[in-house]
Image (tube, helix red, strand yellow):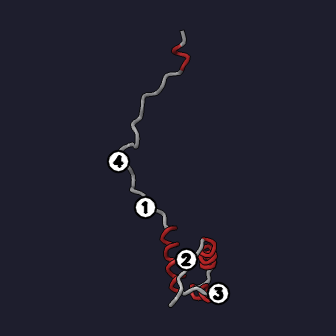
Amino acid sequence: MTQRKHLDDFLRGRITGRLECGRTQLEVSEELGIAQSVISRLWQRFQDDEQPEQSPGPMEESPRPMGQLIEPMDQFET
């Protein structure tokens, strides 16, 4: 039976760093002795997390109502 281990943050960083530098998943898999399917899943998850979220679009109304302007303090001195 195959032993399963969680990848620590450092190893995940090494994997994604190598893939970002242009190495193939197969190369990284062979270099680190990790199954290519694990590399593939990690890379897919990394890319999904890096996608910018879709903004909801322009708002119909101002997010907060505009208040009245405050008069300068010197007008209230007696």
Q: Which mark is residue 60?
A: 4
The amino acid pointed to by label 1 is Gln
Question: Foreground mark, 3 or 4?
Answer: 3
**Side (left or right) of 33 relative to 68:** right
Q: Is residue 7 above or below residue 30?
A: above
Mark 1 against mark 2, which lies toward the viewer? 2
Residue under label 3:
31
Q: Mark 3 vs mark 1: which is more N-terminal?
A: 3
Disc 3 and disc 4 in contact, CB within 8 angstroms: no
Residue 72 rendering spot, x and y as whole percentages: 53, 21
Closest to the camera, between mark 3 and mark 2, is: 2
Marked residue nearer the N-terminal end (1 or 4):
1
Checking the image for residue 54, the label placed there is: 1
The residues bearing labels 1 and 4 have C-alpha atoms spaced at a distance of: 17 Å
Q: Which residue is mark 2?
A: 6
Asked whether disc 1 touches disc 4, contact meaning CB atoms under 8 Å apart, the reply is no
